[in-house]
Image (cartoon, coloured by chain):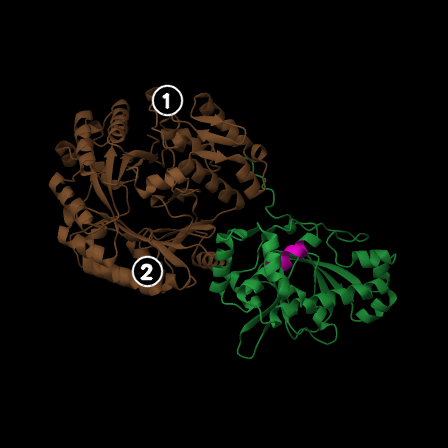
Chain colours: A green, B brown
C-alpha cells in the first residue's frame, strides 16, 4: 500500500526557501533590501551572512538569555517563543513570533540577548549574522526603516500586557493580533492554528490557564468563535475586534 | 438514522469475515513497544496544552472473576481469594497518583466506568474507596450528565449492595446475562437465574440509577432459536434501558477459556444469523431503537436521543453520549486515548505491578496517531455513529481532496456500493439500512492497516456477524 499524502493542514508550516541569489518568500527584510536594489549577493558583499537554520524541533533553543549577541533571526516557518526567567525561576513569556517575523531585535543595543528563544513547533530560521548592524543599516536606508518598524511593533505588542485589561479584552486582543499578523502574510485571518500551549498563552496574557479556557468556552457559547483542538475559527471577528480595540489602540 | 437494519442472509454470509470492532482506530494490533512512559507523558502534556483541553473519561479495570465463563475473551484472572483485591488496589492507588499528576486540575471528569473481569468482585467499601481516591485526585464534573457506571455480574451482588453503590455515586449499570436458556448456561459455565437478574435490575431502579443495560450474546454453544427467543422475551419484559447483543467469536487459540467449548455445540453460520435476526425483530417489536453495531436502546434513553441529535460517540467503552474526551485507562491491560495517542497498560499482573512498584507508569505499548490516522479515525467514528461520511466537512477539516486521498478506499468500497450497503451521494457516503449490520465491513475499506490479504490471514479479530 502506498504512503498516503496528507496535504498539510496548515500552509504556514511550509517554508518557501530562497537560494544564494533569492530571498525566501517569507523574508522580513527582502522588500527593504530589494527596494534599495540590493539582492542577496549584494548583502554578501557587505559581509552580512544570511544562514538558514533548522529545522529546530519543539523545545529546542534558538538562543539563551545571556548568550553573546551575534545575530538576529527571521522566522521562516513555525513559531518561536521568547521568554525570560526571573530570580524565583518563574518563566515570563514575552511573545510568539510567526513566519516572517524577527527575533533578537531587543538585543541590538547590548552585548548579549536579554531573553531566551525556543521553538514551539518545527521551526526554520534565517540568521542574519552581523555584529555591526548599524553599519549596514546606514548603507541600506530601507533596512533602517524596516528595523525601526519592527522594533516599534515589538514595543506596541508589549503594551497589550501592561494595560489594565480584563481577561476577555486580553484574549480578544491576542486573537485579533494573531489574526492580523497572519492576514498581513496572506493567510486566512479567520482560521488560527495555535501551536503554543495553553499555559504559554496564559503566561503571556498574565492570566490563569483555566481562565483562558473559560473565556474561550464562553466566546464559543456566544458564537464568537469555534475551537477544535488547537484550531480556532473566528466566526464573528467584528465582535472580537470591538472587544480588543481598547487594548490594541494603546 | 433511526431505521431498522435490514438483515439479508445472503449478504451477511458473503460479508462474514474477520474484522475489527473499531472501538479504536488504529486498532490495538498496531500499538508498538516503542511507545512507552516518556511518550505517554508527552502526549498528556500536549493534551493539557489545547486552548480548551478535553474533559476526561476514566476507566478502571478490575481483572478478577470468581468463576470462569467459557466464552470470555477479556483479560481476567479467576480466583476465589478475595484478599487478592487488596494487593491490587494498593497498586491501583499508586497508578492513580502517578496518572492524575499528568493532567491539569481544571480538566473535568465526565465519565468513570468500572469494567472487568468482574468489578463487583470488589465490595461496596472497596469501590467507595476507589471512587473517593479518584475524586480526590481528579476534578469530577458537577454536570448532570456526569456518569459513574459499572459492569455487574448479577450472580455475585446483593440488592442491598446496589443501594450502597448509588450512594457512592454510581448511576449506570451494565448486567451480564448472555442467555437464560439452561442448556446454554451449562455449556458456557454461567448459571444465572431470571430472579437474580430481576432483583438486581429492580434494586438499580429503586436506587435511582439513570440507566440499566443488559448484555446478551448470540452464537453461543447449545443456543437455539426457541431458547434465545424466550430469553429476548424475558429481557424485553425486564425493560432495561439498553440492550447489547454481542456476537460470540470462537477463537480458542487466542482465548484459553474458549477451549472448554465444544466446537460441535456451536450453531452453524446460518443458525447464528437466525439468532441475530430474532434479536433484531423482537427488540424492535418491543420498542427498542437500533443504535448501531450490537446496541439497542429505548427511545427515551440518552443514547437513542443522542443518536437522533447526531451527537453519538464511540470509544473503548462502546457507544457514549460524551463528546470527545481523553480516555484514561487504569488497571492491568487498560487502554488509554490521550490527545493524539493510544496506549495500553501491561496485560499481565506481574508486569503491571512491577512497573508501579518501580514508580513507573505501567504502559507497555501504544502509538502516536499520524494526521492520516486521525482523519481515518474521525471518518470511521462518523460511519459507526452517524451512519454517514460527510465528505466536504472532512475535506475542510483536514485540508484534503477526498477523492484523491481515499482513492484506494473508494475503490475497495465499490462492490459494497454495488451490493447496496452504502449510497454514494455528491457530498456524503451514506450507510443504507442493508449496510447497517455490516458497518464494520464498510469501515474496513477505510482502514489503512488492512491489506487485501487480511481475508486469508488467520483471524486476529472476531468475525463481522
Of residues B267 and B7, which is closer to you in this image? B7
Query: Compared with residue A72, is residue B286 higher up or lower down, i.e. above or below?
Result: above
Please tell me whether mark 1 sits on a helix, a strand or a loop. Answer: helix
Chain of the residue under label 1: B
Q: Quadrant of the N terminus of chain B?
A: top left
Q: Main secondary structure of the magenta part?
A: helix
Residue A125 percent across, percent down from the top left: 69, 59
Structural distance between the alpha carbons of marks 2 and 1 = 49 Å
Residue B215 percent across, percent down from the top left: 24, 39
Q: Residues within 10 Å of mark 1 (few under 14, many from 20)?
A: some
Left or right of B128? Residue B407 is right
- Image quadrant assignment for residue B289: top left
Left or right of A208? Residue A66 is right
Please tell me whether mark 2 sits on a helix, a strand or a loop. Answer: helix
Q: Which numbered tag is attached to residue B125?
A: none
Does residue B222 appear anywhere in the picture?
no
Query: Compared with residue B5, is residue B55 higher up or lower down, i.e. above or below?
Result: below
Q: Which numbered tag is attached to residue B11?
A: 1
Residue B187 percent across, percent down from the top left: 16, 34
Q: Quadrant of the C terminus of chain B?
A: top left
In the rendered image, residue A65 lying in the magenta stretch gets the answer no
Left or right of A32? Residue B433 is left
Query: Compared with residue B261, is residue B97 higher up or lower down, i.e. above or below?
Result: below
Magenta residues (range): A174-182
Residue at 19 percent of width and 28 percent of height: B229
The residue wearing badge 2 is B354
Query: Compared with residue B227, is residue B310 higher up or lower down, i.e. above or below?
Result: below
In the rendered image, residue A181 lying in the magenta stretch gets the answer yes
Amino acid at each position: 500500500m502506498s504512503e498516503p499524502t496528507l496535504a498539510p493542514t496548515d500552509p504556514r508550516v511550509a517554508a518557501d526557501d530562497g537560494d544564494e541569489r533569492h530571498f525566501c518568500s517569507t523574508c522580513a527584510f527582502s522588500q527593504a533590501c530589494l527596494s534599495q536594489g540590493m539582492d542577496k549577493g549584494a548583502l554578501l558583499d557587505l559581509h552580512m551572512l544570511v544562514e538558514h537554520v533548522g529545522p529546530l524541533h519543539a523545545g529546542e533553543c534558538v538562543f539563551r538569555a545571556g548568550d553573546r549577541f551575534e545575530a538576529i533571526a527571521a522566522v521562516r516557518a513555525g513559531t518561536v517563543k521568547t521568554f525570560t526567567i526571573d530570580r524565583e525561576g518563574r518563566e515570563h513569556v514575552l511573545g510568539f513570533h510567526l513566519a516572517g517575523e524577527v527575533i533578537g531585535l531587543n538585543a541590538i543595543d547590548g552585548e548579549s540577548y536579554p531573553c531566551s528563544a525556543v521553538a514551539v513547533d518545527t521551526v526554520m530560521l534565517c540568521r542574519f549574522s552581523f555584529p555591526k548592524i548599524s553599519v549596514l543599516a546606514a548603507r541600506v536606508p530601507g533596512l533602517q526603516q524596516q528595523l525601526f518598524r519592527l522594533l516599534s511593533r515589538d514595543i506596541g505588542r508589549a503594551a497589550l500586557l501592561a494595560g489594565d485589561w480584563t481577561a476577555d479584552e486580553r484574549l480578544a486582543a491576542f486573537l485579533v493580533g494573531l489574526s492580523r499578523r497572519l492576514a498581513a502574510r496572506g493567510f486566512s485571518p479567520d482560521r488560527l492554528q495555535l501551536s503554543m500551549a495553553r499555559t504559554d498563552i496564559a503566561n503571556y496574557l498574565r492570566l490563569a490557564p483555566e481562565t483562558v479556557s473559560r473565556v474561550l468556552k464562553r466566546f464559543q457559547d456566544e458564537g464568537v468563535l469555534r475551537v477544535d483542538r488547537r484550531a480556532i475559527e473566528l466566526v464573528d471577528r467584528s465582535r472580537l475586534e470591538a472587544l480588543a480595540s481598547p487594548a490594541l489602540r494603546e | 438514522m433511526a431505521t431498522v437494519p435490514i438483515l439479508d442472509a445472503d449478504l451477511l454470509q458473503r460479508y462474514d469475515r474477520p474484522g475489527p470492532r473499531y472501538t479504536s482506530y488504529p486498532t490495538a494490533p498496531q500499538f508498538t513497544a516503542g511507545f512507552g512512559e516518556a511518550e505517554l507523558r508527552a502526549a498528556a502534556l500536549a493534551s493539557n496544552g489545547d486552548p480548551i483541553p478535553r474533559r476526561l473519561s476514566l476507566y478502571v479495570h478490575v481483572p478478577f472473576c470468581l468463576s470462569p465463563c467459557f466464552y470470555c475473551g477479556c483479560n481476567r484472572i479467576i480466583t476465589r481469594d478475595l484478599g487478592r483485591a487488596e494487593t491490587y488496589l494498593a497498586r491501583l492507588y499508586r497508578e492513580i497518583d502517578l496518572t492524575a499528576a499528568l493532567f491539569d486540575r481544571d480538566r473535568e471528569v465526565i465519565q468513570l466506568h468500572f469494567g472487568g473481569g468482574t468489578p463487583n468482585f470488589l465490595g461496596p467499601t472497596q469501590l467507595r474507596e476507589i471512587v473517593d481516591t479518584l475524586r480526590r485526585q481528579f476534578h469530577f464534573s458537577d454536570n448532570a450528565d456526569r456518569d459513574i457506571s459499572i459492569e455487574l455480574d448479577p450472580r455475585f451482588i446483593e440488592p442491598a449492595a446496589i443501594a450502597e453503590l448509588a450512594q457512592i455515586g454510581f448511576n449506570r449499570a451494565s448486567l451480564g446475562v448472555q442467555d437464560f436458556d439452561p442448556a446454554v448456561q451449562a455449556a458456557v459455565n454461567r448459571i444465572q437465574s431470571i430472579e437474580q437478574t430481576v432483583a438486581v435490575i429492580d434494586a438499580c431502579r429503586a436506587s435511582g440509577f439513570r440507566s440499566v443495560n443488559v448484555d446478551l450474546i448470540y452464537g453461543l454453544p447449545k443456543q437455539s432459536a426457541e431458547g434465545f427467543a424466550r430469553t429476548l422475551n424475558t429481557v424485553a419484559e425486564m425493560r432495561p434501558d439498553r440492550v447489547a447483543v454481542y456476537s460470540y467469536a470462537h477463537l480458542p487459540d487466542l482465548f484459553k477459556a474458549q477451549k472448554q467449548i465444544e466446537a460441535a455445540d456451536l450453531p452453524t453460520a446460518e443458525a447464528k444469523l437466525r439468532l441475530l435476526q430474532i434479536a433484531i425483530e423482537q427488540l424492535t417489536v418491543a420498542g427498542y431503537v437500533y443504535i448501531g453495531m450490537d446496541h439497542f436502546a429505548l427511545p427515551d434513553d440518552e443514547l437513542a436521543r443522542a443518536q437522533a441529535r447526531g451527537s453519538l460517540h464511540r470509544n473503548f467503552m462502546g457507544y457514549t453520549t460524551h463528546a470527545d474526551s481523553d480516555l484514561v485507562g487504569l488497571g492491568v491491560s487498560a487502554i488509554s486515548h490521550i490527545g493524539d495517542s493510544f496506549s495500553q497498560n501491561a496485560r499481565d499482573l506481574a508486569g503491571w505491578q512491577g512497573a508501579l512498584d518501580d514508580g513507573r507508569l505501567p504502559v507497555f505499548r501504544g502509538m502516536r496517531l499520524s494526521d492520516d490516522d486521525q482523519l481515518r479515525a474521525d471518518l470511521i467514528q462518523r460511519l459507526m455513529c452517524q451512519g454517514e461520511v460527510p465528505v466536504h466537512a472532512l475535506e475542510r477539516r483536514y485540508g484534503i481532496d477526498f477523492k484523491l486521498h481515499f482513492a484506494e478506499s473508494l475503490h475497495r468500497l465499490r462492490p459494497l456500493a454495488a451490493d447496496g450497503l452504502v449510497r454514494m451521494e455528491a457530498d456524503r457516503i451514506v450507510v443504507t439500512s442493508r449496510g447497517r449490520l455490516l458497518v464494520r465491513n464498510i469501515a474496513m475499506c477505510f482502514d489503512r492497516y488492512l491489506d487485501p490479504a487480511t481475508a486469508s490471514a488467520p483471524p486476529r479479530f472476531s468475525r463481522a456477524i
